[in-house]
Amino acid sequence: MSEFVVIAGMSGAGRSNAAAVFEDLNWFVIDNMPPALISKVTDLVERPGSETERVALVIGRGGSDYIEELGPELDMLRSSTARVRVLFLDAADEVLIQRYEGTRRRHPLGGSGLADDIKREREMLSTLKDQADVVIDTSDLNVHQLRDKLVALFESSEMDPSLRISVVSFGYKYGIPRDVDLLFDVRFLPNPHWVPELRTHTGLQKAVKKYVLDQHDTEIFMNKLEDLFSFLLPAFKREGKSYLNVAIGCTGGKHRSVVISEELAKKLRAMGFDPRVSHRDISR
């Protein structure tokens, strides 16, 4: 089975960097892809004898007519026998403005002003973003972090139909992660920060883990989480969802959220999933 990834998103959000990553992963990359040619490329790839299996189509810049043409072509691509995913790259308006001012490039819409151009492009792409399988906000990502994220999502050539789950712990004092489907606040649990001998440790260490897990409310919460995910995950899979980003937050992202994220990952593995766990603020 052939595999397509359609790379779209806001101008300045990192499509060119994403295309370079896919090339490094040995995908066949077509940059600035005109929508009208998508069906022709699909026919060539799915033709008997074709040796091209993984294709990344980078959707180029264009106006409203361009976006309108893209919709039917994506529908046609999704109706083929290929596995199709749409990757949408986004970033906050102020970040996009800063990037454009830093490079002195002109926005492709080239209207009355940069802020207005970004606003108009966001409105044009809103439907496409809603239909995307994967949305990555690159506002806080450098080139290397974006690469790591894309490699984790797209490196494997196996057509794995299972739901890919990412669990991240974080600290509310540093802001909520941008790319989140489900978010859980564990600040109701006693904070190890106020236990002097635990303050400098993290949730990856036995003493902190024991302190958090020994709380009565932790046991109740984890049981409820297990029930919730036992219900949600099969439902997400039935609806064809490919990726799920889960965030667990505490005050500093160093103790409670780390322990709960690791424990949730264990329960997800027992359900037959293979979650990817990261701890955003553990070293702060």
Image (cartoon, helix red, strand yellow):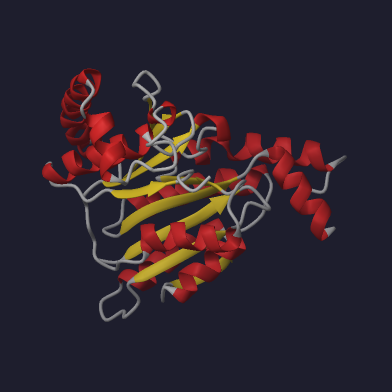
Is 229 in front, or is 279? 279
Question: From the image, which quarter does the N terminus lie in?
Answer: bottom left
Residue 94 drawn at (x, y percent) = 73, 39
* Left-right relation of 42 to 171: left
The number of discs equals 0
Q: Residue at x 46, y 45 (%)?
A: 280
Give the residue at the far right of this rendering: 112
Residue 45 drawn at (x, y percent) = 35, 71
* Left-right relation of 70 to 208: right
Q: Quadrant of residue 132?
A: top left
Is 127 in front, or is 181? 181
Residue 177 drawn at (x, y percent) = 50, 37
Asked if residue 36 shows in the view, the reply is no
Q: Residue at x 77, y 48 (%)?
A: 98
Residue 195 drawn above or below residue 23: above
* Left-right relation of 245 to 274: right
Residue 133 drawn at (x, y percent) = 40, 45
Q: Residue at x 78, y 52 (%)?
A: 100
Asked if residue 177 shows in the view, the reply is yes
Residue 73 drawn above or below residue 132: below
Is 186 in front, or is 176? 186
Q: Residue at x 17, y 27 (%)?
A: 231
Residue 213 drawn above or below residue 26: above
Is 109 in front, or is 201? 201
